Image (cartoon, rainbow, N blue to C red):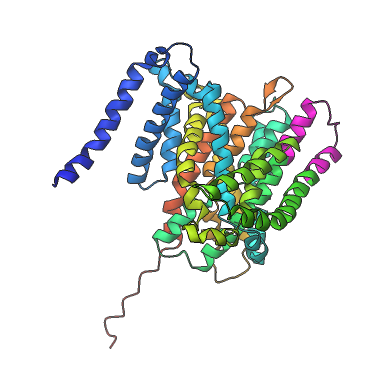
Amino acid sequence: MTGRGRLLGKRPSAGILLLAAVLLFPSIAFAGGEDPSVPLLLYLVVILVAAKLMGHLAVVLGQPAVLGELLAGVLLGNLHLAGVHGLEGIATDPGVDLFARIGVVVLLFEVGLESTIRDILRVGLSSFLVAVLGVIAPFALGWLVGAWLVPGHSWQTHAFLGATLCATSVGITARVLQDIGKSRGKEARIILGAAVVDDVLGLIILASISGSIVAAGEGGAPSGIWPQVGITLKAVGFLAGSLLVGTWITPRLFSGAARLRGAGVLIGVSLAFCFLLAHLAGVAGLAPIVGAFAAGLILEPVHFRKFGERNIRHLEEGLRPLVELLAPVFFVQMGAKVELTAFASTGALWLALLLTVAAIAGKQVCSLGVLDRTVNRWAVGVGMIPRGEVGLIFASIGASLVFEGERVIGATTYSAVVIMVVVTTLVTPPLLKVMLADPKPVPPPDGGA
C-alpha cells in the first residue's frame, strides 16, 4: 500500500475519534461563556462529522448517503438512552433549526433546478397518469391508515400522513437505472417524467393542507370544503403566477446581473431569487419550499448563458457546496427528532408497518397509468416507491404546525413516518434491479445445429 493509500485508510479512524471525543465531552460546548453561537458550533461539528461518516457507510453498503445522514440523527437524538447527555439540542436548538430550515429551502431549489417548465409540458400521457394516480392512491391510503390507527387526532393529522406518502424521491431510482444501464429505457422516461408532475402535485397538496391549518389557527378558516378549495386554488395560483411572471422577469434579471463584476454573482443573484419566492410563498400562507421549488423550475440554463465568459455554466454545481453543508443539518435534525422509546408501544409499530405497506401499495396503483403494453408496468410502480428526503420534508412541516394545542404530526407519528421513509428507500434498489434484469438467454436444444 502506498503512503497516500495508508493516509486515506486512516481518515475514517480519525473521524471516529473526533466524533467520540465530542460525544464524551459535550460540556465543552458551553465552556466559552454566554455566546449563543458556541453550543451551535459544537452541534454543527457533531452533525457534519456524524453525517459524513454515516453517509460514507451507507454508500459503501450500496445505499444513498441521505439514508446514512438520517440514521446518524436517530443515533445522536437517542444517545441519552445510553447515558450520554449534552446533545439534546441537535433536535431542539433554534440555531440548528434555522440552519435546517434554510437547508430545506435550498434543497427544494436544487430539486426544482433539475426540471424545467418545458419538462412539465413535455411529459407524455403515461407519465401524467402515473403521476396523478401515484398521488391520489397513496394520499387516500395514508389518510385511511391515520383515521384507523390514530382516530383521536384531527383530520389534519390524517391528511398530513397522506401527504407524506404522495411525493417520490426519484433520485434514488435514477441512480439505480443508471447503474443497470436502463436510464434511457421507456420505463426510465415514464418514471422521470412522472416525478416532475408528482413533485408539483405533492407540493400543491402540502400547500393546501398547511395553509388551511395556518388559517384555522388564525381564526380565518370556517368549516366546510370551500375554504380548502380556496386554499388549493391559491396554491395553484401562486405556482402558476410565479412561473408566468418569473419566466418574464428572469431573463432581464440575469442579463443585468451578468454585467456585474466580482466573484459569486450568479450564485448570489440566484439564491436571492430563490429566497424572494420562498418569502412570498410564506407571506401568502403557503410553505416556503413551494416558492423555492418554483424558483428552481423558472431558472433555466439559457438564463446563465452570458455568464459563460466567466466559466459559470451550471448553477447546480455552484450550489453544491452550500447544499452539502446545509442539507445534512436538515436530515440529521430530522433523525434526531425520532424517539425510539415511542416504539415500545405496539400502536407505533403498527402505524409504521401499515404506513409502509400503504406507501408501497399506493405507488403500485400508479402502474395502471402506463398505456404502452411493451413497458414493464411493475417496474414503473417500483421506481416510484422511494420517499427519501421529500417525505421527510413534508413530515417536518407537519411536526412544526400546531392545531388546537397539539402538533399536527406528533412524536410517535413522526417516528413512524421516518421508519416508512427508511424502508421504502431500502427496498427500491434491489426490487428495481430484479424487475428490469435482462432475461438470461435460453440455451439451444442439444440437437440443434
Residue 120, compared with residue 277, is above or below; it is below
| Quadrant assignment, res 369 | bottom right
Residue 137, can we see it?
Answer: no
Q: Closer to the camera, 384 or 278?
A: 278
Magenta region: which residues?
A: 208-232
Residue 193, compared with residue 198, is above or below; it is below
Name the residue: 68% across, 50% down: 201
| Quadrant assignment, res 433 | bottom left
Name the residue: 61% across, 25% down: 410
Residue 326 in the figure: left or right of residue 275:
left
| Quadrant assignment, res 191 | bottom right
Number of numbered tags placed on the structure image: 0
Q: Closer to the camera, 282 or 410?
A: 282
Name the residue: 57% across, 63% down: 190
Q: Closer to the camera, 122 or 49?
A: 49
| Secondary structure mostly taken by the magenta-highlighted segment of the chain | helix
Residue 158, compared with residue 108, is above or below; it is above
| Residue 228 covered by magenta stretch | yes
Q: Residue 343 location, x and y as percent? A: 50, 25
Q: Residue 44 location, x and y as percent? A: 44, 28
Q: Closer to the camera, 249 or 416?
A: 249
Residue 404 in the figure: left or right of residue 18:
right
Residue 312, can we see it?
Answer: yes
Q: Residue 128 location, x and y as percent? A: 66, 60
Residue 363 in the figure: left or right of residue 43:
right
Q: Residue 296 location, x and y as percent? A: 61, 51
Residue 112 in the figure: left or right of residue 29:
right
